[in-house]
Image (cartoon, helix red, strand yellow):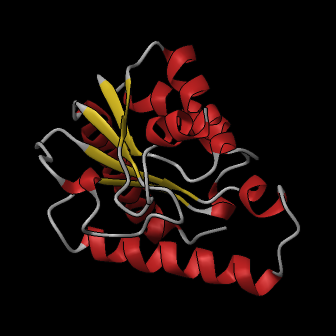
Amino acid sequence: MFPKSSAWFLGLCWMIQTHLSYVHNAMRTETLRIILGDQLNRDSPLFEGVAEGDCFWMAEVVGESQHVPSHKARSAYFLSAMRHFSHELRSEPYRLEYLHLNDHAWPSLQEALTATLQTLAPSRMAVVQPGDLRVQTELEAAARDADIPLDILSDSHFLSSPEHFAGWAR
């Protein structure tokens, strides 16, 4: 397949990949900070008090564009915005774990997060209040299954908190 002269190069590539994988996995993850596709905002409470061991996490999953009928252009805009935001984060000193749509087979956010939790084993997780209860339920289930605390931060984009609204609705 490759000429014999390139065998040393392939060996070197394998050694580098193995080393980088070891170093990446050896980094202790304190807080896994989950960025959802509709929360691409550097002014988010998620960016307050970031510690050296923290890791941001974003995932492109098929289920998020299929749970309600959605035009392909809308899905493409979401993915494009997520990828641009991830490039911005990578230019900063932040650690980011980004799952591209074609790089994994997990159909749901919960399954993708569960796999990441097994790999990174964070001490805790944080997310800004999801605008969709279905998404929040998936995140809470992944946290509960992994026995990792999940901090849900208030979102300043809502007019009121869920608790305030529930009190008003009574």
Query: Which residue is at 40% across, 43% downward?
Result: 127
Query: Which residue is at 43% across, 45% downward?
Result: 161
For the question of whether residue 29 can be seen, the reply is no
Most extreme residue toward the right is 69
**Nearer to me, 101 or 146:** 146
Q: Quadrant of the N terminus?
A: bottom right
Residue 125, percent across and down? 36, 32
Q: Using the rendered view, name the quadrant where residue 11 is placed.
A: bottom left
Q: Using the rendered view, name the quadrant where residue 122 is placed.
A: top left
Q: Quadrant of the C terminus?
A: top right
The vertical placement of 32 against 76, above or below, is above
Q: Using the rendered view, name the quadrant where residue 69 is placed.
A: bottom right
The vertical placement of 23 against 79, above or below, is above
**Nearer to me, 79 or 132:** 132
Q: Is residue 76 left or right of residue 57?
A: right
Most extreme residue toward the bottom is 73
Residue 151, percent across and down? 35, 31
The vertical placement of 129 against 92, above or below, is above
For the question of whether residue 10 can be seen, the reply is yes
Query: Which residue is at 64% across, 34% downward?
Result: 138
Residue 60, percent across and down? 61, 60
Q: Number of labelled discs?
A: 0
The vertical placement of 34 against 139, above or below, is below
Query: Which residue is at 34% across, 70% downward?
Result: 41
**Nearer to me, 9 or 32:** 32
Q: Is residue 169 left or right of residue 156?
A: right
Residue 86, percent across and down? 39, 70
